[in-house]
Image: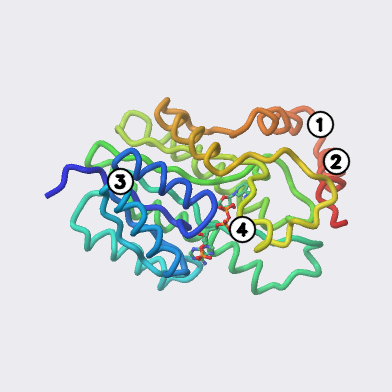
């Protein structure tokens, strides 16, 4: 029986999730990593095992479906070990005027970005509370702080993640369980190609995925409820506190308008 801690990382096949897997392996975590691309997960698992000697179990699952969520939870239960850390990272975006986007894709995004997070958190949280320890990290976004024209559904899913996480972080205060919402800004990953958002008219400061993860893990160590990663992103997030809502959508709409 190992004394290493166990983490579940969703969306570990690329970008921020993959960077989390590397950082956690370096911290000595065994992991269950989840995504749809099994080949990517297998090569990640092999690399992390070789480099850090940790045990990685891969789960090929579509978390936008109830079946994928069940398969993931089954993998956690069948490990026979308590989960020390859940990283709810898997997420997708879409880009363009809402009326022109495919309804099925928007709904799939809500299923992944919202439903899967609620389901995984709801399964894991009572077990962590009963044990008196455990951490949950929810990947939100700076789009959570204001409505986002041309990424309307995506921004709204991230507002959900932020509010949901902050509320639960308060509920579990004093139980030994910690919940952190991470709000990255523009991070160069596969997200831009998958969502189509590379066509945005205004470019913003980029922060590498590794830095997002470092700031997130530091914030978790400090017991914070929310972290906006990157100094320029922290400054931008303050704008929504002072601008009237209608002016805010005008400013953000200009920045996100397709070229
Ligand atoms: N990049 C940014 O600028 C940015 C900014 C703020 C917040 N975020 C958030 O950061 C998180 C990670 O995104 P990223 O930037 O790292 O993008 P990414 O490189 O596209 O990674 C997304 C990950 O989610 C997985 N995924 C997508 N659909 C899935 C599904 N149906 N079931 C299971 N896994 C699925 C992908 O794996 P498979 O395709 O193999 O399934 C991949 O591992 C997301 O929640 C995103 O909203 C990103």
Foreground residue among 165 and 17: 17
Which numbered circle lies on residue 52? 3
Q: How many marks?
A: 4
Which circle, 2 or 4, is nearer the viewer?
4
Nearer-N-terminus badge (1/4): 4
Nearer-N-terminus badge (3/1): 3
* C-alpha distance separating marks 1 and 4: 32 Å
Say if 116 sits above or below 232 in the image. Answer: below
Q: Secondary structure at mark 4?
A: loop
Check whether the beta carbons of the residues at disc 2 and disc 3 lie within 8 A of each other: no
Give the residue pinned by disc 4.
190
Give the residue pinned by disc 1.
243
Q: Secondary structure at mark 1?
A: loop
Horizontally, residue 164 falls left or right of residue 92, namely left
Check whether the beta carbons of the residues at disc 1 and disc 2 lie within 8 A of each other: yes
Nearer-N-terminus badge (2/4): 4
Q: Secondary structure at mark 3?
A: helix
Nearer-N-terminus badge (1/2): 1
* C-alpha distance separating marks 3 and 4: 26 Å
Give the residue pinned by disc 2.
251
């Amino acid at each position: 029986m190992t004394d290493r801690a166990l983490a579940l990382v969703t969306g570990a096949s690329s970008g921020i999730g993959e960077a989390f897997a590397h950082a956690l392996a370096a911290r000595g975590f065994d992991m269950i990593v989840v995504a749809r691309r099994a080949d990517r997960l297998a090569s990640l698992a092999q690399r992390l095992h070789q480099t850090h000697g940790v045990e990685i179990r891969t789960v090929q699952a579509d978390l936008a479906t109830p079946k994928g969520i069940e398969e993931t939870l089954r993998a956690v239960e069948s490990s026979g070990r308590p989960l020390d850390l859940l990283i709810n990272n898997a997420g997708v975006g879409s880009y363009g005027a809402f009326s022109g986007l495919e309804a099925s894709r928007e709904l799939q995004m809500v299923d992944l970005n919202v439903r899967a997070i609620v389901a995984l958190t709801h399964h894991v949280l009572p077990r962590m509370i009963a044990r008196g320890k455990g951490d949950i990290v929810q990947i939100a976004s700076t789009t959570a702080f204001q409505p986002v024209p041309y990424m309307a559904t995506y921004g709204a899913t991230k507002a959900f993640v932020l509010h949901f996480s902050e509320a639960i972080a308060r509920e579990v205060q004093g139980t030994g369980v910690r919940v952190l919402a991470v709000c990255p800004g523009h991070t160069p990953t596969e997200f831009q190609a998958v969502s189509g958002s590379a066509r945005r008219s205004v470019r913003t400061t980029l922060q590498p995925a590794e830095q997002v993860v470092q700031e997130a893990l530091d914030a978790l160590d400090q017991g914070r409820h929310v972290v906006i990663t990157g100094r320029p992103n922290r400054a931008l997030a303050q704008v929504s506190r002072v601008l009237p809502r209608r002016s805010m959508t005008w400013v953000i709409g200009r920045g996100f308008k397709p070229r």
